[in-house]
Image (cartoon, rainbow, N blue to C red):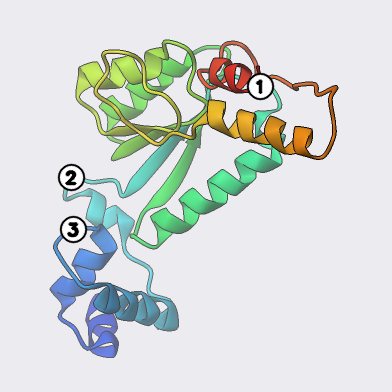
Amino acid sequence: MVATIKQVAEQAGVSAATVSYVLNGTGTVTEATRQRVLNAVSALNYQPSFAARSLRGRSYTLGLALPAMPGRLADPALAEVLAGLADAATGRGYQLLLAAPDGERSGTELCISLARTGRVDGLVLLDMLVGDERAAALCELGFPHVCAGPAPDGCASAAVEVDGADAAAQAVRHLLSLGHRRISLIQLPSDLAESEPCYEGYN
């Protein structure tokens, strides 16, 4: 038997509207209430009807936009990032769509297409490039997105950044403290926005 939102609400001891707030990431609920709802969703194996929800104007899908970099999906570090994003999205009632450009469309064209067709409610841009045109295009469209790395100058994007210069400097200092003096750097591709800060920290 397929569980309903009403059954989830009864199990969690809240209203159906509160369940909807938690799953949609809207409204204001306490962390304790949110956790009760998520526990009830898990216990009842409740599956929201994304087809019905999308008719109300939202796809409940987030896109993860990768640049054209052969072999990138084989990177174990990327797998950790994707796992974290998937867990966070699922906990808020969203699905993930991994999007990478092919030979026919550039990364910028792909992002614009996803934004205009309504297939996703927002985009996470991974592997930010120097002067990344994807972010600039989405800024121009006014489409919700987050840059996982430095946003281009003059673009009012939300960004989640790691201080690559400080991280590299800390790594070098640690190796020096162990007595090492000949320290090499396996550098990121030069077109990545995080490449130059990493090199600066290494120097």
Give above or below for 130 relative to 23.
above
- Foreground: disc 1 or disc 3: 1
Residue bearing mark 2: 57
Q: Looking at the image, is mark 3 or mark 2 earlier in the sequence? A: 3
Please rate how many residues cluster around mark 1, counting C-alpha atoms within 10 Å: few if below 14, some from 14 to 19, many from 20: many
Neighbour tally class for label 2: few under 14, some 14-19, many 20 plus, Cα within 10 Å: few
Mark number for residue 94? none
Q: With 35 as the anchor, is 81 left or right in this view?
A: right
Image quadrant occupied by the N terminus: bottom left
Residue 73 x %, y %: 66, 34
Q: Residue 202 shows which numbered tag?
A: 1
* Of the image marks 1 and 2, the number of the one nearer the N terminus: 2
Give the Cα separation between the discs numbered 1 and 2. 48 Å
Residue at image location 35% in from the left, 22% down from the top:
113
Image position of 200 with respect to 75: above or below: above
Residue 126 pos. (x, y %): 49, 30
Residue at 26 percent across and 13 percent down: it is 154
Direction from residue 96 to residue 168 in the image, left or right: right
Q: Position of residue 171 (x, y in %)?
A: 68, 35
For the question of whether residue 74 can be seen, the reply is: yes
Helix, strand or loop status at disc 2: loop
At a point 23% along the width and 46% down the height, the residue shown is: 58
Is residue 115 shown above or below 85? Answer: above
Left or right of 79 on screen, residue 5: left
Q: Which residue is mark 3?
A: 26
In the image, which is nearer the foreground, mark 1 or mark 2?
Answer: 1
**Residue positioned 58% across, 17% down in the render:** 200
**First in residue order: circle 1 vs circle 3:** 3
Amino acid bearing label 3: Thr
